[in-house]
Amino acid sequence: MSWAVEEWKEGLSPRVLQKIHELESQVDKLKKERQQRQYQLESLEAALQKQKQKVENEKNESAILKRENQSLMELCDNLEKAKQKISHDLQVKESQVNIQSGQLNSSKKDIERLEQELKR
């Protein structure tokens, strides 16, 4: 088959043959360069896809963390409200205990006074 490819060159001057040879060499060189660039392009496209996937994963993780953070903030708010309510309830109960303690002391004094009157 190569003889058919070379047959058209028969009868050409050495100068023209030299130029054809230079052009064929240049074509081969350009084909190799094109293949290398195609390989580089494919490698870069693969790296780009990998980076896009990484960015997408980071976005998803960020969204998950934002939701988790929001949930934790709401939980903290609820706990703070519960703490305030418990603190208020405790103050109310302490106040009631103080009132009842005062009443108890007053009743004890009344009892002592009445006992003293009975002894007289």
Image: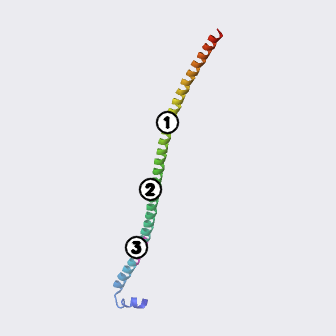
- Magenta stretch containing residue 67, yes or no? no
Q: Nearer the viewer, mark 1 or mark 2?
A: 1
Read off the residue under disc 2. 59
**Residues rendered magenta in the picture:** 28-36
Q: x, y percentage for residue 117?
A: 62, 11
Residue 15 figure quarter: bottom left
Q: Amino acid at mark 2?
A: Lys
Read off the residue under disc 1. 85
The residue positioned 49% from the left and 46% from the top of the image is 72
Q: x, y percentage for residue 10?
A: 36, 91
Task: Give how far apart the Cα atoms at labels 1 and 2 are.
Answer: 39 Å
Which element is circle 2 on? helix
Q: Please report whichever mark, 3 or 1, sits nearer to the chain's N-terminal start.
A: 3
Which element is circle 3 on? helix
Q: Nearer the viewer, mark 3 or mark 2?
A: 2
- Which is more toward the observer, 111 or 89? 111
Q: Residues within 10 Å of mark 2 (few under 14, many from 20)?
A: few
